[in-house]
């Protein structure tokens, strides 16, 4: 099933459960905190084990792709020349970073704004995202890197592909053009 | 705002509370005391803390500077000695106004270093520029790393520690001190216009985005190279240049040993910074070889760097000799040179095209500005309403004429 649909279903179920919980009760809050922290810790461990496996495999196969232009900024298409190892490390590090930013956000919501509900709602998704991560599938579950797991990974679309594709380009012609574009060495203003 | 200032106010209150007893005494009471009595009832903890912090800052500065000096001394002394004694350069490093030998020039609190050597067959000069972290200012290093971690696009470009050796050929070959020097040095240098590089896979992307000449190249893996490296050349035919002049049995083990600190070796005639005009392109075009490594800190790494430099000097020796003698063994054939000339003219065309586009855009903007200014002046003088009225009348007249034709 599509990850976004399952996220939505989990959210609905959690909402129903949270309505039945007394969020003012200290004991309930304590158990919700334990649930959230365990979930984050499990996700972090999964990502970290994946990271260790990536470093151990040390796959130095060259990977070339063109990142499409960003309509929000003035940046045009950009060639990325990297190795499978570096690509995987970059992806896994951004996942680990997203855990930290999630903790910061939840810390602000829970300790400063005194909301407990978001803490409960976010207690499943970190583990779920970790298990659904392409890199975890490849390195922990040993799935072959083909189809949806082929690098560079396709960016998940919010609206089922409407509004144009935002995927990296890997066709030979685009890469050759980008390689000779001479965009490097631009002096910083 | 109060949330930010509150902790600060609390600190100030705490500091004041330390001397509550001293401050509670009137000035007459304080005057009546001796200097020692006044000093003994005063709580010096705040001042002591400030002094300790100042001493720590100075110690950090001192240790930082000493560490950088130690690393630089080790590298530059060995490297200069190698250039002087093994590669036989006649002038190495600098002499100050007192005639004292200086191994390097330093800048920015011992974080940037430069040395220079010249006076040798085939080589015009060797320049080594090295960068070390500004250890004298630990806070700035922590701050810059934090910014680079959370906002990579704002990261400072030269955050890492590196050494970059630029070897420039001179197109003159002399087998020994009595040899006759060739007069066609310019012609020889003109034939050394191509880009071919061996780049460590760890830094492919960064090297391409920081160096204009590498961003014009095609990246290709090869069985001839250790798995840690790729070729980046303007055409695949140039990939063989390295192995043509350095034996595979010498080059590959050397590259393998250097893989943890060597970033790239590149033969190029194009600049590091992107030229925006044809004039800049022509001005900065000069053949050279660039060796970029992470700052070598151990004796083993320094020795490996020396071997790399020695290999490149040997390449220039052999290549210059082949070109002067027009040897049948020469790598740079006329076909290859034609390709590189075509490549450069295409690149110049592209730069000119971009320049023209930029000029057109500027002209367009200027025209729009002028039009705006004209309309503003007309509005101020009342002419604009007259013109608008005339236009309106014209439109009405046309409308009427159209209706008449229809009837």
Image: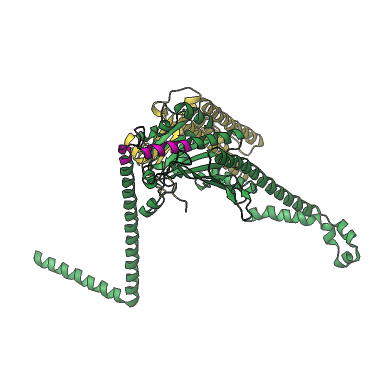
- Provide the major secondary structure of the magenta segment: helix
Left or right? Give the position of B150 relative to B336: right
Can residue A127 be seen here? yes
Q: Nearer the viewer, residue B376 or B349?
A: B349
For image coordinates 43% across by 45% down, the residue present is B170
For image coordinates 16% across by 68% down, the residue present is B398
Quarter-of-image position of residue A45: top right
Image position of B68 with respect to B369: above or below: above
**Residue B172: image location, x then y, percent:** 42, 43
Residue at the extreme front = B178
Report if residue B334 lies within the magenta region: yes
- Chain in green, by letter, is B
Q: Nearer the viewer, residue A10 or B135?
A: B135
Left or right? Give the position of B378 relative to A78: left
**Residue B229: image location, x then y, percent:** 46, 32
Chain A visual colour: yellow
Report if residue A134 lies within the magenta region: no
Q: Quadrant of the image for the C terminus of chain B?
A: bottom left
Magenta region, residue range: B313-338
Tally of numbered tags: 0
**Residue B386: image location, x then y, percent:** 27, 75
Left or right? Give the position of B318 relative to B16: left
For image coordinates 34% across by 54% down, the residue present is B355
């Amino acid at each position: 099933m599509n990850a976004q649909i399952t996220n939505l279903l989990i959210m609905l179920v959690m909402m129903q459960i949270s309505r039945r919980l007394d969020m003012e009760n200290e004991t309930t809050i304590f158990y919700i905190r334990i649930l959230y922290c365990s979930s984050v810790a499990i996700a972090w461990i999964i990502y970290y084990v994946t990271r260790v496996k990536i470093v151990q495999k040390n796959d130095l196969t060259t990977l070339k792709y063109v990142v499409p232009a960003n309509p929000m900024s003035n940046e045009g298409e950009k060639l990325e020349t990297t190795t499978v190892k570096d690509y995987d490390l970059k992806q896994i590090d951004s996942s680990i970073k997203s855990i930290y930013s999630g903790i910061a956000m939840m810390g602000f919501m829970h300790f400063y704004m005194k909301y407990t509900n978001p803490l409960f709602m976010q207690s499943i998704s970190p583990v779920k995202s970790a298990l659904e991560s392409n890199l975890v599938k490849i390195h922990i579950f040993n799935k072959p890197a083909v189809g949806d797991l082929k690098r560079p990974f396709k960016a998940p679309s919010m609206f089922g592909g409407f509004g144009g594709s935002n995927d990296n380009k890997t066709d030979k012609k685009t890469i050759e053009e980008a390689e000779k574009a001479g965009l490097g060495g631009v002096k910083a203003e | 705002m109060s949330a930010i200032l509150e902790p600060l106010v609390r600190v100030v209150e705490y500091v004041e509370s330390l001397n509550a007893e001293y401050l509670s005494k009137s000035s007459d009471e304080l005057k009546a005391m001796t200097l020692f009595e006044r000093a003994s009832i005063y709580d010096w903890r705040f001042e002591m803390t400030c002094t300790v912090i100042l001493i720590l800052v100075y110690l950090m500065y001192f240790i930082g500077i000493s560490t950088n000096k130690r690393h630089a001394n080790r590298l530059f002394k060995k490297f200069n000695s190698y250039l002087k004694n093994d590669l036989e350069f006649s002038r190495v490093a600098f002499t100050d106004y007192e005639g004292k030998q200086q191994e390097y020039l330093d800048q920015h609190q011992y974080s940037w270093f430069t040395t220079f050597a010249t006076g040798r067959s085939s080589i015009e000069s060797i320049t080594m520029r090295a960068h070390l972290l500004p250890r004298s200012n630990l806070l700035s290093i922590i701050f810059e790393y934090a910014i680079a971690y959370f906002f990579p696009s704002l990261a400072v470009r030269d955050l890492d520690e590196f050494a970059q050796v630029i070897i420039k050929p001179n197109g003159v070959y002399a087998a020994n001190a009595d040899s006759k020097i060739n007069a066609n040095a310019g012609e020889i240098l003109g034939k050394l216009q191509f880009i071919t590089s061996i780049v460590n896979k760890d830094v492919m992307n960064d090297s391409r985005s920081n160096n204009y000449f590498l961003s014009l190249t095609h990246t290709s893996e090869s069985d001839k190279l250790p798995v840690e490296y790729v070729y980046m050349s303007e055409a695949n035919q140039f990939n063989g240049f390295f192995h043509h002049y350095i034996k595979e049995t010498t080059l590959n083990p050397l590259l393998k040993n250097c893989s943890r600190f060597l970033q790239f070796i590149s033969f190029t005639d194009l600049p590091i910074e992107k030229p925006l005009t044809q004039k800049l392109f022509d001005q900065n075009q000069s053949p050279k070889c660039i060796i970029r490594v992470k700052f070598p800190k151990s004796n083993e790494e320094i020795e490996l760097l020396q071997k790399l430099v020695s290999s490149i000097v040997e390449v220039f020796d052999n290549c210059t000799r082949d070109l002067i003698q027009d040897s049948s063994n020469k790598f740079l054939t006329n076909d290859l040179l034609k390709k590189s000339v075509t490549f450069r003219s295409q690149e110049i065309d592209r730069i000119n095209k971009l320049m023209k586009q930029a000029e057109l855009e500027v002209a367009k903007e200027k025209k729009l500005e002028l039009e705006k200014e004209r309309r503003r002046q007309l509005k101020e003088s009342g002419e604009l309403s007259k013109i608008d009225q005339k236009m309106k009348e014209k439109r009405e007249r046309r409308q009427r004429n159209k209706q008449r034709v229809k009837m």
